[in-house]
Amino acid sequence: MVSVALVLLVLADAYFVLTTLVDLFPFNNVREARRSEQVAEVAINAPVMALPAVLFAWAAGAGLPALAYVGGALELLAVLNGLALWWLPYLAAVTVPWATAGTGESWAALHARTYAKTVIVLPRRGDRPRPNLEHMILHALMLAAAICTFAAARTL
C-alpha cells in the first residue's frame, strides 16, 4: 500500500503539470490559456501538490506515520478545493472566491475560453460551467491518492 500511495501522489502531480503545460487538445485546451496563466498555475499548484508526496516519502523512510497523515490531509484538502472549484458551479451555481484569482475574469468566462471546447461528458445544466474529463481524472487520482495515503499511514 505504501508504494501505491506514493505512486498515486506523484502521478497526480505529474498529470497536473502535463495537462497544464502540454497541448493535448481536445482533452485539454492549453492553446487557449495564456502562457503566463499556465506558468502561474504550475508555479503555485505543483509545489502544493508535491508536498504530500514529500511528506509521505519522508514518513515512510523515517517510520513517522504522523507525517503520512499530514500528507494525506493535505492531499485531501487539495482535492476538496478542486472539487469545490469545478463541481459547485456545476451542481449549485456557486463559484468559489479563488476560482479566477488574478485573471480579471468570471469563472464562466474563463471556463468558456479555456475549457468549454475540451472533452466534457457531463450533461448541460443551463449555462453553468461543466467539469471536463481532464479534471475529473485529476480529481479521481487525487482522491485515490489521499485515500491510499491514509490507508498506508496506518501500516507505518
Image (cartoon, helix red, strand yellow):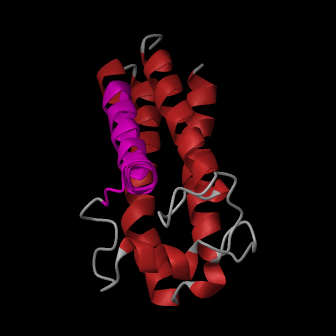
Q: In x, y percent, where is residue 90?
A: 46, 54
Q: Please tell me whether residue 61 belongs to the stretch shown in magenta.
A: no
Task: Look at the picture and state if 33 lies above or below 2.
Answer: below
130 and 27: which one is in front?
Answer: 130
Q: Magenta part of the protein: which range? A: 68-95
Residue 117 visible in the displayed image? yes
Q: Residue at x 45, y 88 (%)?
A: 36
Q: In x, y percent, where is residue 156?
A: 44, 14
Q: Quadrant of residue 17?
A: bottom right
Left-right relation of 56 to 139: left
Q: Please tell me whether residue 83 belongs to the stretch shown in magenta.
A: yes
Q: In x, y percent, where is residue 65?
A: 36, 19
Task: Look at the picture and state if 107 lies above or below 151.
Answer: below
Q: Specify the farthest residue to the left.
A: 97
Q: Main secondary structure of the magenta part?
A: helix
Task: Look at the picture and state if 119 lies above or below 65.
Answer: below
Task: Look at the picture and state if 104 lies above or below 116.
Answer: below
